[in-house]
Every structure is written in C-alpha cells, then in structure tokens.
Amino acid sequence: MGAQHGTSGHTRSVVRIVAIVVAMFGFGYLLVPLYNVFCDITGLNGRSGRLAEAEATANFKPDPNRMVTVQFLANNDASMPWKFRPGVVTMKVHPGQLYATYFVAKNPTATKMVAQAVPSVAPAKAARYFSKTECFCFSQQPLEAGEEKQMPLRFIVDPRLPKDVKTLTLAYALFDVSHQTAAK
C-alpha cells in the first residue's frame, strides 16, 4: 500500500512541475508582446503611439496659442554602417496640428541591406502625447548598395500634452535586420 501512495504522490509532483514549467514558458513567451502593449498604452519607455491621420485631424483641434519644440535625433546600432540623419533637427509645432518631416538614410556598403528603426520619445511622460500617422519605423527599410532615400514622418502632438513640457525629443535607433529578412 505504501508503494502505491508513493507512486501517486510522485506522479502528482511531476505533473505540478511540468505545469509550472509550461506556465513559465508561456509567461516568458508573452512577456515581450505584453510589455509592448503596456508601453504603447502608458507611454512608458519613451514609446509613442501610432494614429490614423483621419483620426488625428478629427480628434485634435490645433492650439494656436502654444508652441512646443520637437527635436529629432538619429542613432545607429554599433553594427549598422548606414549614414542616418534627420532632415531637420528641430521644429516648432502647435499641439493638435499635423506636421511632416523626413529622415535620410544612405547605405554606403557594396551590398543590399535592410534596416529597422526603433523610436523613443523623451521625456517619457510626454511619449503618450506624441503620435505618428506615417513613419518609416512602421516597416523595414531596404536600401540597395550605395542607395540614399528620404523616409517620411508625419506626426501630431496631442494638445493635452502637460503644459510644463516645452520640448520633446524623438530619437530613432537604426538596426541592421538584413540577416533576419534573408532567413524568411
């Protein structure tokens, strides 16, 4: 009778351990998408939102009495050889009004490459008030050897931006994803 009880207890323990391992794997697998959703909702980690242009122009009324400075920065990952820069370094904008600018990328190498830009907004508390209606960061950017192109950015600053925020900084980090796209 003792042997049966021991085997039954052992089986229950194994089932519990397997369930815990499966739950941990599932949590780990979902952690990045959940974190991204959390950051998009809260603006945490300097992430800004994506908004349809029709929605942006319908929902926001421009504030002609307020000006905010938007600074643009471009950075490359250490392994990215491209030349990458903003078309303009700063813009004075009225919250609630739609604006357009661009970034320039050049592939100085002898081979085709693919890049992905990752945006961040500072200060972090202002990120939720900065929305892009069109952005090169929404998709991967392929460039042929020696090719240069202007990549569009259209954005709007929500008029509900806290009054103490006078300057926003939109920074992009550019990463080489050529190997990831070649594997697909």
Image (tube, rainbow, N blue to C red):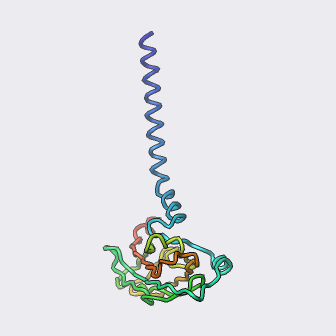
Question: Residue 145's quadrant in the figure?
Answer: bottom left
Name the foreground residue: 42 vs 68: 68
Name the foreground residue: 63 vs 22: 63
Q: Is residue 60 left or right of residue 45?
A: right
Question: Residue 132's quadrant in the figure?
Answer: bottom right
Report the number of numbered marks.
Answer: 0
Residue drawn where x is 37% and y is 78% of the image: 75
Q: Is residue 39 left or right of residue 54?
A: left
Is 8 rendered above or below residue 80? above
Percent from the top left, x then y, of residue 17? 43, 34
Is 7 rendered above or below residue 122? above
Residue drawn where x is 49% and y is 86% of the image: 102
Percent from the top left, x then y, of residue 56? 63, 78
In this orientation, does residue 116 appear? no
Residue drawn where x is 47% and y is 54% of the image: 31
Name the foreground residue: 147 vs 124: 124
Percent from the top left, x then y, of residue 82? 36, 81
Percent from the top left, x then y, of residue 16? 46, 32
Q: Farthest residue in the left direction?
A: 78
Q: Quadrant of the N terminus?
A: top left
Is 41 rendered above or below residue 137? above
In this orientation, does residue 23 appear? yes
